[in-house]
Image (tube, rainbow, N blue to C red):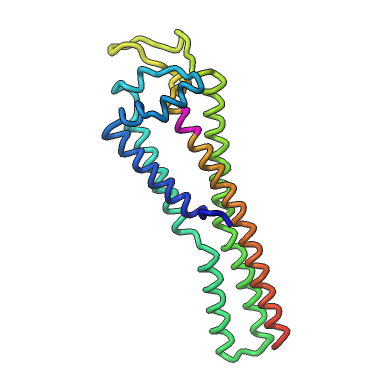
Amino acid sequence: MALLSSKTLIQAHALFTFILAVYLITSPSAITESDIIFIIGEAMQIDLDPAMTSSQYPLAICAILLTGEVLIDLIIVRKLPQIDDILSTVQHEQRRTEDTGFSRITFQKPKQSINALTIQLATLYNEIWTFIAGARFCFFFGVSLFIYTSGGKTDSSAWVDNDDGLQKVGMEQVKSRVVFTYAFVEMMFWLWTLSNVREERREVATRLAQQQAVENERNLNL
């Protein structure tokens, strides 16, 4: 079993992302001039982007997008049913059905439908987060690889003149130490989460098999 569950990791990630969004609005220099960004930028030889310290960089928009991501993650992780709750509900329904004194023939059909629903609900959490974690890992891996392979270098054709000075355009805006550091950290986090979700999926299958074995043994004793 993993040291931290995927649910705990996702909630901790949501808290960290929300704090990051607040800093991007209130004090962006605390993020753009942080030690970790400087160290990773120097290690990967990515140029320091002067636009990161200017008011033109859309840090506020990034903060809004990060906040939206936090809300979506929290809603999904809190609303999806957990296997402990599902199994306890099924066991409660089975005990209540047994107490009603139904015959064995009328009792077997509802039990089969409950088992099928249990499997679908128990694997729903793992299937959704496997897709989300895998998709985000691939996305941030692509962003990190794009910046790393380009070396964070920009050419003169990537800049345009405006009233306030030079401004980067197109995909060249992505090539910065801040974007690379964030993408790299996100890539490592979602790889960790994906590994935990896959391990929890195996545990869910084991617990469902044990629950099914208990039900089969109870049926034989009836």
The residue lying toward the viewer, choosing from 179 and 156, is: 179
The residue lying toward the viewer, choosing from 93 and 151, is: 151
Dividing the picture into quadrants, the one containing residue 212 is bottom right
Position of residue 222 relative to residue 118, above or below, is below
Which quadrant does the C terminus fall into?
bottom right
Would residue 33 be found to the left or right of residue 116 on screen? Answer: left
Position of residue 56 relative to residue 10, above or below, is above
The residue lying toward the viewer, choosing from 67 and 205, is: 205
Would residue 221 be found to the left or right of residue 172 on screen? Answer: right
Position of residue 80 relative to residue 73, above or below, is below
Residue at the bottom extreme, as displayed: 101
Question: Is residue 202 one of those drawn in magenta?
Answer: no
Residue 192 in the image: x percent, y percent? 55, 45
Residue at the top extreme, as displayed: 156
Residue for point 51% across, 42% down: 189
Residue for point 40% across, 46% down: 70
Dividing the picture into quadrants, the one containing residue 202 is bottom right
Residue at the right extreme, as displayed: 220
Which quadrant does the N terminus fall into?
bottom right
Position of residue 87 relative to residue 136, above or below, is below
Residue 153 in the image: x percent, y percent? 49, 15
Please report the bounds of the magenta region as a residue range: 180-184
Residue 211 in the image: x percent, y percent? 64, 72
Residue for point 52% across, 34% down: 140
Principal secondary structure, stretch drawn in magenta:
helix
Residue for point 47% across, 50% down: 9
Would residue 219 be found to the left or right of residue 38 on screen? Answer: right
